[in-house]
Image (spheres, rainbow, N blue to C red):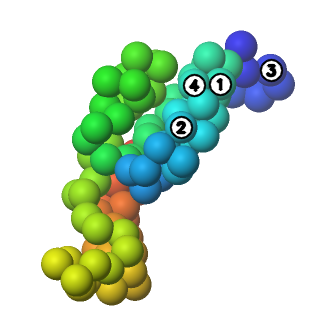
């Protein structure tokens, strides 16, 4: 049940680490249970969990968030790459 007003459409996004994904999945589950349409953009490892909770799953490319010696991608570069994919998803969900 959505309560007052019509159901709404929500787009949630989370990095793929459990500390980011679990709260987003919990929030999305509650919104979906109240009759809202929910999209959750996160890493592929969470697909089954997202869909089991009644949400649409939107994958994002996985990348190393924090640089390492082997993968020296700077965090701001990773954020820019993630933003580009999210823009397209926003257009689709609208």
Residue 16 placement (x, y as % from top left): 38, 50
In the image, 61: left or right of 30?
A: left
* Residue at far right of view: 4
Task: Tell me the number on the disc at residue 83.
Answer: none
Mark 1 or mark 2: which comes first in sequence?
2
**Disc 2 on helix, strand or loop?**
helix
CA separation in Å, label 1 and label 3: 13 Å
Query: Distance from label 4 to label 3 (Cα)?
Result: 16 Å
The reply, left or right, for residue 15 in relation to residue 77 is: right
Residue at the image point whose x is 31% and y is 32% from the top: 47
Give whichever of 24, 84 is nearer the camera.
24
Residue wearing tag 2: 22
Under tag 4, what secondary structure? helix
x, y percent for residue 92: 33, 49
Of callouts 2 and 4, the N-terminal one: 2
* Residue 15 spot, x, y in % from top left: 43, 55
Image: 2 above or below 83: above
Q: Secondary structure at mark 1?
A: helix
Q: Quadrant of residue 33?
A: top right
Q: Return the residue at label 1.
A: 30
Which element carries disc 3, helix, strand or loop? Answer: loop
Q: Mark 4 to mark 1: distance in Å?
A: 4 Å
State how far apart marks 2 and 4 are (Cα). 10 Å
Asked if residue 91 can be seen in this view, the reply is no
* Lower position in the chain sequence, tag 2 or tag 3: 3
Cα separation, mark 1 vs mark 2, equals 13 Å
Q: Earlier in the sequence, mark 4 or mark 3?
A: 3
Cβ–Cβ below 8 Å for labels 4 and 1? Answer: yes
Residue at 72% over, 21% down: 2
Q: To which residue does mark 3 refer?
A: 3
Residue where numbered disc 4 is placed: 29
């Amino acid at each position: 049940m959505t309560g007052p007003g019509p159901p709404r459409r929500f787009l949630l996004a989370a990095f793929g680490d459990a500390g980011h994904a679990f709260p987003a999945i919990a929030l999305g589950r509650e919104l979906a249970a109240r009759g809202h349409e929910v999209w959750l953009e996160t890493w592929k490892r969470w697909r089954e969990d997202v869909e089991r909770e009644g949400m649409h799953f939107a994958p994002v490319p996985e990348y190393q968030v924090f640089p390492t010696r082997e993968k020296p991608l700077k965090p701001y570069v990773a954020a820019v790459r993630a933003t580009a994919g999210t823009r397209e998803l926003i257009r689709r969900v609208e």
